[in-house]
Each structure stands twice: as C-alpha cells, then as structure tokens.
Image (tube, helix red, strand yellow):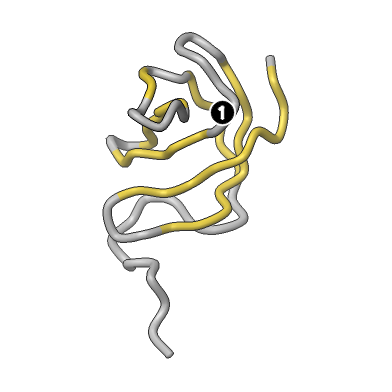
Amino acid sequence: MPKEQDKETPVSEGDTYDVTIEGIAREGDGIARVQGFVIFVPGTKVGDKVKIKIERVMRKFAIGAIAEKS
C-alpha cells in the first residue's frame, strides 16, 4: 500500500520543528512553513512560536500538533 507522504517533502512524520504561525486557514488552524512547505497546526494563532510534531504528511501540506509552546 503506497504511503501518502511524497519523498520530496522537507518534513517527515514524527519529526519536531520550531515554527512561528504565519497565518490562519479557513478552518481556523494556524499555518506554519518549513522550507516553504505548509504545515497546519490546530489550536494556534498568528505570531505563536511553537514546537510542533508532524503527525501526517501529504503531498502538498502536513498536519502538526503542538509539542511545546514558547
């Protein structure tokens, strides 16, 4: 069964990153970027500096969860 994760993505499931939330998606999730790659982070707002853990990676975006808030 093929994985949804594309080898071209700069992030991987389980990895953690320090990010700043740059915007808010229509659904209300915060938007961060790692090397330009979009990561949706629920429970955040613009300007939040958070450590996130990548939970799911798709071809064009990833979903992360707050691991630690600064």
Image mark count: 1
Q: In this view, does 61 lie above or below 43?
A: below
- Residue visible at 48% across and 46% down? 63
Q: Is residue 35 left or right of residue 67?
A: left
* Horizontal and vertical percent position of residue 35: 32, 37
- Determine the image quadrant of residue 40: top left
- Determine the image quadrant of residue 27: top left
* Horizontal and vertical percent position of residue 43: 60, 26
Q: What residue type is labelled 1?
A: Asp
Q: Is residue 48 left or right of residue 2?
A: right
Depth check, front residue: 50 or 28: 28
Give the class, few, some or many, for how many residues have Cα within 10 Å of label 1's Cα (few <14, many ≥20): some
Quarter of the picture holding the C terminus? top right
* SS for callout 1: strand
Quarter of the picture holding the N terminus? bottom left
- Residue visible at 42% across and 77% down? 3
Q: Is residue 2 above or below residue 18?
A: below
* Horizontal and vertical percent position of residue 47: 48, 9
- Residue visible at 38% across and 71% down? 4
In the displayed orientation, state which residue is furthest to the front.
27
Q: Is residue 70 above or below residue 65?
A: above
Mark 1 lies on residue: 18
In the displayed orientation, state which residue is furthest to the right.
68
Q: In this view, does 46 lie to the left or right of 23?
A: right
In the displayed orientation, state which residue is furthest to the bottom.
1
* Horizontal and vertical percent position of residue 54: 55, 48
- Residue visible at 29% across and 60% down? 59
